[in-house]
Image (cartoon, grey):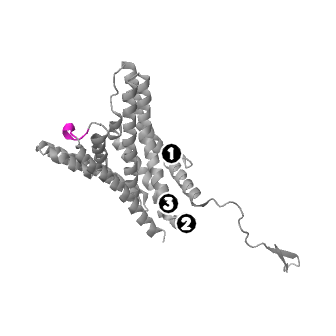
Amino acid sequence: MAVEHPVTAPSGDQTRIHNIGYRSYDGPRLGRAYARRSLYSQSLRGSYGLGRSVKSKVLPMLLFVVMCVPAAIMVAVAVVTKAKDLPVDYTRYAIVMQAVISLYVASQAPQSVSRDLRFKTVPLYFSRPIETADYVRAKFAALASALFVLTAAPLLVLYAGALLAKLDFADQTKGFAQGLVSVALLSLLFAGLGLVIASVTPRRGFGIAAVIAVLTISYGAVSTLQAIADVQNSAEAVPWIGLFSPITLIDGLQSAFLGASSAFPGGIGPSNGEGVVYVLAVLGLIAASYGLLMRRYRKVGM
């Protein structure tokens, strides 16, 4: 209830101050689940610049188009020439377009977390009701989902084109499903690594440079070492060298278990036994990325 305090102003006019105090909130409290979903949806929208300035939309949308245009061209060629198969397998497409994927991760992983670190808003998230695990899961899932959209969309274009070209339905459906499994693992792995690297620094520019360096330099170094090993007749070492780069990890895993052709020198991917090591390495890196993010944000939120 408001309390009125009559006050006599110097001019002789009577002024009233109404002390209404604080009022409690009686509406619904949606809790952690709602906050987590909201953070996930906003982070996912932000990965494509939705709800942000026009400038923020340019790069992610451009990269999305760049990912899809080659697939559309391949489909057009297959339909016009009445080809019996697509020029590129579903499982190979992401490997071929790895540079675009790496650039997307480098641009959007820092955007997802660096601003929160720079402006010190992370402790505000953790005030209530959201907790550290909710924040990490929402950010991880949002970037992984954005990457899955980026990598699965061209596969869908290829699949639709293959059906229009009247290619074998069973073969195309099997290849499409294998491609989706491959890009799902790639999305989880790249999202985890990108967020871990970006969370180290609040400077977005440093985060972008660091992500690009890790993803591209590691691939270049591993590919060079594999080529040297192949030339020196040490083909048995080629699959083991592939364990030290994210993109070659996905390449080796899908060639071992998803029937994909390998980009390794000589076209020889890991055996099934070596492929098990690849699976463990991919899952281990995803789990380690999540654990490192949890540790990082526990410290930040204190």
Amino acid of disc 3: Tyr
- Residue at which label 3 appears: 135
267 within the magenta span = yes
Residue 178 % position (x, y): 36, 38
Q: Is residue 209 visible?
A: no
Give the numbered dot on residue 75: none
**Residue 183 spot, x, y in % from top left:** 38, 43
- To which residue does mark 2 refer? 124
Which badge, 2 or 1, comes first in the chain's sequence? Answer: 1
Q: Nearer the viewer, mark 2 or mark 1?
A: 2
Q: Position of residue 257 (x, y in %)?
A: 30, 41
Q: First in sequence: mark 3 or mark 1?
A: 1
Frontmost of labels 3 and 2 is 3
Image check: 22 left or right of 253?
A: right
Q: Nearer the viewer, residue 179 or 297?
A: 179
Q: Is residue 257 magenta?
A: no
Q: CA distance from mark 2 to mark 1?
A: 27 Å
| Rendered residue at 72%/64% (across/down) | 26
